[in-house]
Image (tube, grey):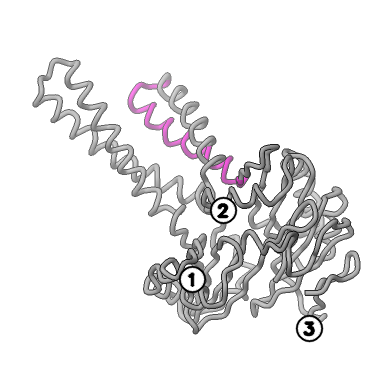
Amino acid sequence: MSEGAAGAPARAPKDEGTVTELCILLACFAGRSHAAKIRRKLDKRIAHSGDAILDEVVVKISSKRRALVYDPRRTLRGALTPALTWGIFGLLAEGLRGLVVWAVLGAVCGGLYAYYFEHLLAKDELRRIGGRLPGDSSALVAFVRGPDPQRLLSSAAALEPVTVSVATVAPDLSAHVYRGTAPLKGPTTGEAPNGHGSELSMLLVRFAGEHTARQTLVSSGSSATHQGQAEPQVELVIETNPHGRRRVVNPTTGSAAFAKVDAISWGLFGLVWGVIVGFTGHGGILGSIESGLLTGILWALFGVVAGALYGLWAGRGLSARRLKRLGAFVPPATSLVVAWADGSPDPETVERWAGSRSQRLTLRFTPAGDGAVLEV
């Protein structure tokens, strides 16, 4: 891909009359906390222009080049959801005092968990990102629904990022990259500094058939891993039935996943707590076991509800309602996968993972200068 003039598209669209609906913004800044500080200001600029932010991620790189990735919206929801569920549990167990204590405890624990762990990137991927980006820096990635990438680019460039780029994705999964006026000190084409390729790639894969995406991913198994390159990690599966109704499935952070995990953790905690209460209440060994089993079952049931609510509200990056105006990307009787891959997966790996009967787009996050840029 050749570098265009400042503020011009890196690759000109085939059809200038095409209305862009999905824009992906990547802006890198000097300073570990700078992206987080300007996020609200950028959000207001985007909203004022009439565009809508679908999802947002902040990346922080420490002075020791340790990367931290978090989603501000999920962090807030991750704090509020346990505050509600744990608060209800405390109310039932200890009354108003329990409500306050457990709500505060739930908010703190839930917020910290969402801040540090509510993301799909593995430790190795975070280590690579931290090693390739400058120390004491930050980045903001935003998925925006809007028709004008240049306007989005200008809004971000006004906040003085080190590097800024916007990728537009059309309903046919073709993409074009626009770069702003921020000067780059390194390459801006397909080759990253020092000969390294991209550190992270986002894949969009669309299938014909409402359930074809999930069926294909299940049948593909771990063939990519067996070939020496890790298979992409699925974040979302979006399904549209023949009548146009959409459903969003989060394999690792959705309601089903969290309900299962919370049922086990809450059940084990209840079992231990019930045994302790039964033993201290002079119920003997049999009484302690009976108390533990009963408490464990009740807490496991509550864990299912709490986990499902957490996955439904805090664990989901996108919902079918928020995707309503992006229906052209997932037309009736189709399914779409959003996944992340370490580095830049080769075509053979993607072919084994997604199958041959699919439309695909790979968007690369490539180090450049003192930051990173988007490339197709």
Residue beneath the point at 80% across and 67% down: 178
Is 97 positioned to the left or the right of 323 in the image? left
Q: Which mark is residue 14?
A: 3
Choose mark 2 or mark 3, whichever is in front: 2
Nearest the viewer among 2 and 21 is: 2
Which SS type dominates the magenta stretch?
helix
Q: Image quadrant for the C terminus?
A: bottom right
Give the mark, 3 or 1, whose residue is nearer the N terminus.
3
Residue 316 seen in the current view: yes
Nearest the viewer among 303 and 97 is: 303
Q: Amino acid at mark 2?
A: Glu
Q: Image quadrant for the N terminus?
A: bottom right
What kind of element bears circle 3? loop
**Circle 1 residue:** 239
Q: Is residue 294 magenta?
A: no
Residue beneath the point at 65% across and 80% down: 172
Q: Which residues are magenta?
A: 69-96
Q: Position of residue 100 (x, y in %)?
A: 47, 23
Q: Are marks 2 and 3 in contact (CB under 8 Å)?
A: no
Q: Residues within 10 Å of mark 2 (few under 14, many from 20)?
A: some
**Circle 2 residue:** 125
What kind of element bears circle 2? helix
Q: Is residue 87 magenta?
A: yes
Q: Alpha-carbon distance for marks 2 and 3?
A: 34 Å
